[in-house]
Image (tube, rainbow, N blue to C red):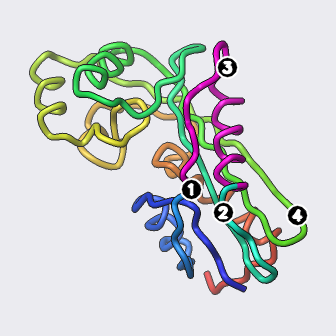
Amino acid sequence: MRLILGSGSPRRKEILASLGIAPDVIMAADVDETPHAGELPRPYCERVTRLKLDAIPCAAGDIVLTADTTVAMGRRILGKPETAAQAAEFLLGLSGRRHKVITAVAVRNADQVWMRTNVSSVKMKRLSDAELNDYLASGEWQGKAGGYAIQGRGGAFIPWIEGSYTGIMGLPAMETAHLLHAAGLRWAA
């Protein structure tokens, strides 16, 4: 069997490696991740994950894995900020509050599709102006849902989580292992 990781995220590759899994092919799916008008965060995340799954070709003997992560501030979707100003807006909105991090995972083989969604709660401490400006200057916010990375410098802003740390990073390990096993992938853990 050949495992195709439908993501260019180094974090997803690292999480798979921590499980003892190495993808045979990495092929980032190019899909429109624009939320639909009025779309709620969880259905949005699941829809984008399925779009990614459908965009990756799957031949007999292949297993395709895709995922999408979004940060939800109430009903508002906080995707990947496009500018430092937008990252600052996201971080100021999250500062001192709890929010949800939603990661949907989908797996397909030639015959079937499996999907799971992980929702974690995260509290961000109240950020000082200096912390916010230093973080923005670091550039770590780029390409990160909600404008922060829990596994990086942004971890210093997170005093509490409830849920999956790896899910917050972008690929919930337990759900992913379960789905890959259901699809027929075997590996030495």
For label 2, the residue is 56
For label 1, the residue is 29
138 w.r.t. 176: above or below: above
What are the residue bounds of the magenta stretch?
30-54
Q: Earlier in the sequence, mark 3 or mark 4?
A: 3
- Give the spatial CA distance, label 4 vs label 2: 14 Å
The amino acid sitting under disc 2 is Ile
Quarter location, residue 140:
top left
- Give the spatial CA distance, label 1 vs label 4: 19 Å
Element at badge 1?
A: loop
For label 4, the residue is 112
Residue 138 locus on image (x, y percent): 14, 40
- Give the spatial CA distance, label 3 vs label 2: 24 Å
Which residue is rendered at x = 56% and y = 72% of the image? Answer: 19
The amino acid sitting under disc 3 is Glu
Left or right position of 136 against 86: left
